[in-house]
Image (spheres, rainbow, N blue to C red):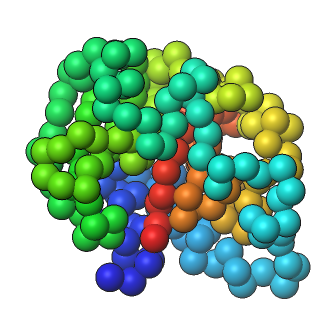
């Protein structure tokens, strides 16, 4: 599969809740921006220019939940999810992926394993309202855009960001802060493209 198609597949398959609405308007705008991101006359800094970026931009929520967090740790901290999907093989990652939903926490996890129905680890993490989770820099649902820009000033990937989607790291591995009316409405951690 082409990287762009994998990006759209992963992005749309994860987006069932879009900041309190069921319409994919933020996703459409973000996708359009990505298509034209490299067509500006003025060069924008790339991920390699962001000296403070660590761990490929994967954020940590509440000081423990991040990409690769084990199934055991998640179950110990949060208990059994309210909903578990089927174990499905994803060609893009070449792993089996199962969707876990903690709806009361506004948390959705895509859990992956190398083999069908084996021990899993967090592959993609998404939070929406009413999530109480915060990043390592104290950013959560409802935080202002200005606070995100200030907190991650040296880690923002300007080439892949847009006014309503701030990318830390890269869409190939990082954190995306989605905004509505100047406030964070969704945080995504993981890969949006491969």
- Could you say where residue 168 lies in the image, as x and y percent from the top left? 68, 51
Q: Residue at x 83, y 72 (%)?
A: 44
Q: Is residue 183 left or right of residue 110?
A: right
Q: Is residue 171 visible?
A: yes
- Could you say where residue 142 lies in the image, as x and y percent from the top left? 62, 24
Q: Is residue 109 above or below residue 1?
A: above
Q: Is residue 68 above or below residue 100?
A: below
Q: Is residue 116 above or below residue 4?
A: above
Q: Is residue 180 visible?
A: no
Q: Residue at x 60, y 23 (%)?
A: 63
Residue 81 or 41: which is nearer the viewer? 81
- Could you say where residue 1 lies in the image, as x and y percent from the top left? 32, 82
- Could you say where residue 82 lies in the image, as x and y percent from the top left? 21, 21
Residue 161 placement: quadrant:
bottom right
Quadrant location of the C terminus? bottom left
Q: Residue at x 73, y 60 (%)?
A: 157
Q: Is residue 66 left or right of residue 77?
A: right
Q: Residue at x 18, y 28 (%)?
A: 83
Q: Is residue 102 above or below residue 4?
A: above
């Amino acid at each position: 599969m082409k990287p762009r198609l994998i990006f759209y597949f992963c992005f749309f398959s994860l987006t069932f809740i879009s900041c309190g609405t069921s319409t994919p308007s933020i996703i459409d705008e973000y996708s359009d921006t990505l298509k034209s991101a490299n067509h500006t006359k003025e060069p924008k800094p790339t991920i390699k220019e962001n000296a403070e970026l660590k761990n490929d931009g994967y954020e940590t929520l509440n000081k423990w939940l991040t990409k690769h967090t084990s199934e055991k740790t998640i179950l110990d901290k949060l208990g059994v999810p309210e909903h578990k999907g089927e174990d499905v093989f994803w060609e893009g990652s070449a792993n089996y992926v199962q969707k876990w939903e903690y709806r009361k926490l506004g948390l959705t996890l895509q859990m992956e394993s190398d083999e069908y129905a084996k021990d899993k680890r967090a592959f993609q993490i998404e939070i929406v309202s009413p999530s109480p989770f915060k990043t390592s820099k104290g950013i959560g649902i409802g935080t202002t855009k200005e606070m995100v820009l200030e907190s991650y000033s040296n880690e923002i990937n300007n080439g892949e960001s847009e006014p309503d989607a701030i990318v830390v790291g890269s869409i190939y591995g990082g954190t995306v802060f989605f905004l509505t009316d100047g406030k964070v409405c969704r945080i995504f951690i993981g890969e949006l493209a491969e």
